[in-house]
Amino acid sequence: SINQYTTLESWKNYFLFPALENSLYALKPGGHIALYIEDYKGHKYTGSVKKKMTQLGQNTFIGTIGWEDTDRQKSKIRRAYIWRKDKK
């Protein structure tokens, strides 16, 4: 998806944020969204993802799940952010 947009802002506004909105809309109350995303090449956007989810409402941030990626020469900790859709 990143190759379809010329700037990080357009990627966030026309791909990432609509995908979050659609996912939250389709999710049943009590269901969970697990999003693996990390800042990339000096671009910081995980904070804006968390902020967007707060703005969308109808969800509660649960926390993160981490794992170690050992497929590389240097291991790296990866994490997924977890939200639960609020019950009505």
Image: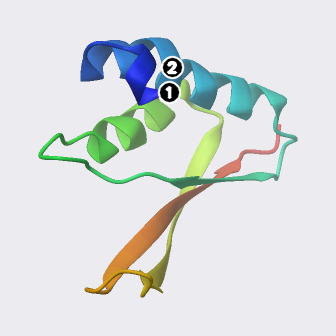
Residue that numbered label 2 is attached to: 15
| Extreme residue in the left direction | 42
Residue 31: % across, % down? 81, 52
Q: Secondary structure at mark 2?
A: helix
Point out the tag, 2 or 1, that comes first from the N-terminus: 1
Q: Is residue 19 left or right of residue 67?
A: right
Question: What's the residue at 44%, 69% (across, down)?
Answer: 79
Residue 68: % across, % down? 43, 86
**In the image, what residue type sits under mark 2?**
Phe
Residue that numbered label 1 is attached to: 1
| Mark 2, other Cα within 10 Å: few <14 / some 14–19 / many ≥20 | some
Please state which of the two labelled residues, at mark 2 or mark 1, is closer to the viewer: 1
Q: How is the image coloured?
A: rainbow
Is the Cβ of the residue at disc 2 closer than 8 Å to that at disc 1?
yes
Residue 48: % across, % down? 31, 35
Q: CA distance from mark 2 to mark 1?
A: 7 Å
